[in-house]
Image (cartoon, rainbow, N blue to C red):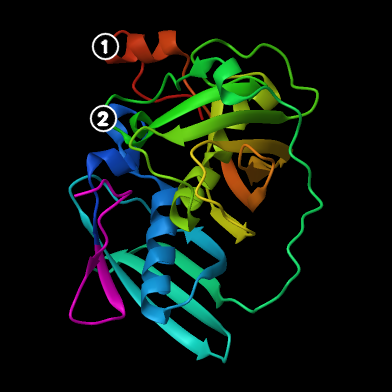
């Protein structure tokens, strides 16, 4: 059987699905793993597409709580409006009575001869000419191990201190599935949740963020192997980060745009983390 991004299980009820939270769908430090928000958004999109029989146009996730490895998330789908060509849908992801993620979306398509874009892909080197990078906080068995990342612009959280504020707040990287999965609405929804990796680059510190929301809007999608993620951190104020992402294929085709707000989190340095794990430092990371 071919590899899939996640296993969304149907039930006897066409409006309810189950998502087992396996380790390879989770992120965070090994002792604090949780379901990646982009996977939760992608699962909701999958559930709505399967229930409505229509392709997704846009979707917004509101992140409420965490799902830990070993749990099972229930997804309940509502379609309050089903028009001739578009549907409006909602999903609530929960574990028993605990709400995890709420998603709203529009689905559908219309016949049109017009297909165009006005956002150009930034001028960056192709994937083969960009250095491979890995997040120093990623584990060997988490979601990030399922992707290859090559840095095209800016600084990636690879464990080196990102000295100095970024002039443009931008990070661009190529990403592809190590399992041969090609770009589709679900894979793009997962990748679109990587906006947080650009926060440390923007402020010049070990930092990230907890997602409050994520919105993805789809354009024309081709089954590309490599996806260019062009991220811009737009502002940080009152401890909240706002950022956007454009997602292109190698030909420059704009496949999707995403926007996100996050709670700013200052991370431990690799040295502080090692000391804490060794029991020689306080267990509470910086706020």
Nearer mark to the viewer, of 1 and 2: 2
The quadrant holding residue 46 is bottom left
Magenta-colored stretch includes residue 97: no
Which badge, 1 or 2, comes first in the chain's sequence? 2
Label 2 crowd (10 A; few <14 / some 14-19 / many >=20): some
Residue 251 x, y percent position in the rendering: 66, 40
Q: 270 above or below 145?
A: above
> Which residue sits at x=39%, y=51%?
39
Residue 60 in view of the camera: yes
Question: Real-space Cα distance between discs 1 and 2?
Answer: 24 Å
Residue 263 x, y percent position in the rendering: 57, 43
Label 1 crowd (10 A; few <14 / some 14-19 / many >=20): few
Look at mark 2 in the image and give the residue it sits on.
Answer: 141
Q: Which mark is residue 108?
A: none
Residue 231 x, y percent position in the rendering: 66, 37
Q: Quick check: 215 left or right of 77?
A: right
The quadrant holding residue 202 is top right
The magenta region covers 1-18
Which SS type dominates the magenta stretch? loop
Look at mark 1 in the image and give the residue it sits on.
Answer: 279
Magenta-colored stretch includes residue 9: yes
């Amino acid at each position: 059987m071919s590899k899939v991004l996640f296993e969304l299980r149907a039930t006897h009820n066409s409006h309810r699905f189950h998502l087992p939270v396996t380790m390879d769908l989770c992120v965070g430090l090994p002792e604090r793993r949780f379901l990646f928000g982009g996977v939760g958004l992608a699962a909701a999109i999958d559930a709505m597409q399967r229930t409505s029989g229509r392709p997704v146009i846009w979707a917004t996730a509101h992140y409420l709580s965490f799902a830990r490895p070993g749990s099972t998330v229930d997804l309940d789908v509502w379609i309050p409006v089903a028009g001739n060509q578009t549907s409006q849908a909602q999903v609530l992801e929960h574990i028993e009575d605990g709400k995890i993620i709420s998603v709203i979306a529009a689905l559908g398509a219309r016949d049109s001869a017009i297909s165009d874009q006005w956002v150009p892909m930034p001028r960056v080197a192709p994937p083969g000419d960009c250095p491979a990078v890995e997040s120093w906080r990623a584990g060997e068995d988490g979601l990030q191990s399922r992707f290859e990342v090559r840095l095209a612009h800016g600084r990636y959280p690879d464990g080196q201190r990102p000295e100095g504020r970024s002039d443009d707040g931008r990070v661009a990287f190529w990403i592809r599935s190590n399992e041969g999965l090609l770009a589709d609405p679900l894979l793009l929804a997962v990748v679109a949740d990587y906006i947080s990796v650009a926060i440390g680059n923007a402020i010049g510190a070990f930092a990230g963020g907890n997602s409050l929301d994520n919105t993805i809007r789809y354009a024309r999608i081709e089954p590309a192997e490599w996806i260019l993620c062009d991220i811009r951190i737009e502002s940080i104020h009152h401890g909240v980060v706002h950022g956007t992402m454009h997602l292109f294929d190698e030909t420059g085709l704009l496949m999707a745009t995403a926007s996100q707000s996050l709670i700013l989190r200052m991370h431990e340095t690799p040295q502080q983390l090692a000391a804490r794990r060794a029991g020689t430092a306080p267990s509470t990371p910086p706020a």
